[in-house]
Image (tube, grey):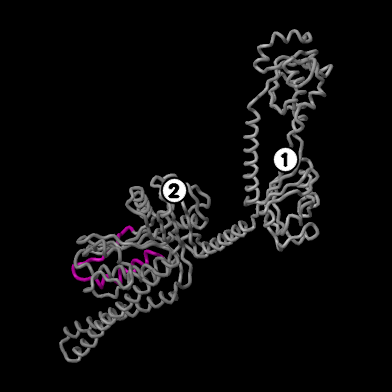
Amino acid sequence: MEGIQATQFDQYKLLARAEVGLWEADFVQRSYICSDYLMSILGKKGNNLSFFEFYHIIREDFRDLITKDFLSIQSVDTYEQVFPIITPTGEKWVRSRLCERELDNGVCVKALGIFQILPDFRLKEEKIEKMVEHNETVFRKLYANLPVGVELYDRDGYLIDLNEKDMEIFGIRSKMDVLGVNIFSNPILPKDVIKKLKENKPVNFRLNYPFKKVDNYYNTSKVGELDIMTKARILYDQRGEPSCYLLINFDNTEKMIAYNRIAEFENVFTLVSVYAKVGYALYDLYSFEGYAIKQWYENMGEKDGTPLSQIIGVYSYIHPDDAKHINSFFEKVRQGKAHHFRREIRVKSGDGWKWICANITRNPQSVDPDKPEMICINYDITELKDSQLKKERAEELDRLRSAFLANMSHEIRTPLNAIVGFSQLLTDTNDPEEKREFVEIINSNNQMLLQLISDILDLAKIESGTMDFKLADMNVKEVVNEIMTSFRIKMPDNVVLIAPDDLPECQIYSDRMRLIQVISNFLNNAIKYTSKGSITLAYEIVGDEIRFSVTDTGEGMSQEIQAHIFDRFYKGDTFKQGTGLGLSICETIVNRLGGRIGVSSELGKGSTFWFTHPYSFSPNAKSPASPNPGTI
């Protein structure tokens, strides 16, 4: 680009009237060629102006910044700056902008630009200065009243300022006590933090700050320790050079004390929840988002950490009847018809059930109708329930014993009265037929009384756990034939005792007397309730068991009586003689021998009492149902 001659600038009188000057920079000669208008503003003669001369025309506080930015146009093609200059007529604000560059091997050697006076910018600057002054005042107030400690260190690490909060945190009475201390000499700061600061790297760190270690570093009124969080940053000047270090300190001590108290409470609550088996959960009824403690999961029969959405509404381990009540409550909550639920529920536990008291309520602090928040507290009441059931059983047993004693009093008096009465009549009659009849009555009541006493003794053995079992190999068919022979003579008129002809020959390992006792009780029971027809004694081999049965054509039983027929002290018909103990004792014997017992009956069509016995042949038989000799 040819040098711009003075005559050429005459063509730009219009620009001069617009208060716009032209300049051409020569980076080789390090000088400007300026238009007449521009030289007149600067108070210079001719059209040449060196970079050095123009440098001193710029206001002092802007010289380095403007010079540095101007030289950057050798590598970039955009440049525009606003800055103040000192002229013969005073200070003026001007705008200088690059218009064109001339390159030589990619390097800018000349540049052409414009230079414009900004007549109103001084007023703007004054406004800006006032705004800056105002902002500085506000900043100072903020700086002084910030709820965090602020420390400012110079480039060499010496403390040059700090705010009142920082003085409060570290127990400093006066700034003069600490100004000038060097951050790199701080005995509390970790070495890696100091290293990063020297490398001009920002760093965040947390310190357990013990005041006993700062005695030789600065004076403080504080003792003990603080929990301090610090953010350290590097501040830069307008040239982009590091100028100072800024540290912001947060005192976390009270917060950590509160956190520790919360943690301590949580630990105590966890211990209480474990030992008292109390669980807690909080969740949104629609999204099931929330949380629960470990004991809550355990009380619900669930694995700790299972998503609540897989538990609430599903209830895999809760009894279906109880789950229906819970889900019904939740539906009422959604409709705004219910807010609280309390119920004892059954939760699957191994092969049985445990009892849980569930208390569910809508959180009163949750006011959003679209997000009902539920609080659930559950606790295990299995032991309490067991104690309650044991108490109820004890009360029931006491009631049954009272009834038993009253029944025994009646049962014992009945045969005794008959024996005493007919014994007296026996001495008063000489009629052989009457004597024979009286003797039969006396014998019958003797047998009844002996059976009664035998049942009472058996019951006492069962209660004390001393019922003996003497196991040995025995021929089943022989035992059945023996029983048939003894009971045929007891059969009432119009009733026949039957045993099938095709009973199989077999042997089992059992207690002969106890087996006879069970079958005999079945037969005696059948005789009492059968006035005509037949009573059939039979057995059959079914798999690894022998099934014995006594079937009669008697009165039969209702379903209610069948449900209680093997209960102690229970009598289906109080007008029939008997203690109400025989069938209960039979159940105990059969269970002890490793079998099962039951009844099937229909009113008016008779009954079938049956029981099973393991089909074993010797003491070494490895049947899981085989009885163990001993006592119960």
> Going by the image, does 569 lie left or right of 56?
left
Residues 374 and 154: in front is 154
Pick whichever of labels 2 and 1 is earlier in the sequence: 1
Q: Position of residue 473 (x, y in %)?
A: 45, 66
Q: Quadrant of residue 260?
A: bottom right
Q: Does residue 277 lie above or below 75 as drawn?
A: below
Residue identifier under label 2 = 284
Q: Dot 2, how many residues are within 10 Å of its Cα: few (below 14), some (14-19), or many (20+)?
A: some
Residues 631 and 512: in front is 631
Residues 97 and 233: in front is 97
Q: Quadrant of residue 583?
A: bottom left
Q: Does residue 272 lie above or below 135 as drawn?
A: below
Residue identifier under label 1 = 235
Residue depicted at 73% across the width and 27% down the height: 85
Q: Dividing the image into 4 quarters, which one contains the N terminus?
A: top right
Q: Position of residue 314 (x, y in %)?
A: 42, 48
Q: Position of residue 360 (x, y in %)?
A: 41, 56
Disc 2 residue type?
Asp
Q: Is residue 313 visible?
A: no
User: Cα distance, mark 2 to mark 1?
Assistant: 48 Å
> Going by the image, does 219 lie left or right of 483?
right
Residue depicted at 37% across the width and 79% down the height: 457
Residue 165 is one of the magenta-drawn residues = no
Disc 1 residue type?
Leu
SS for dot 2: strand
Q: Quadrant of residue 546?
A: bottom left
Residue depicted at 21% across the width and 86% down the height: 422
Q: Position of residue 297 (x, y in %)?
A: 49, 54
Highlighted range, magenta: 475-502
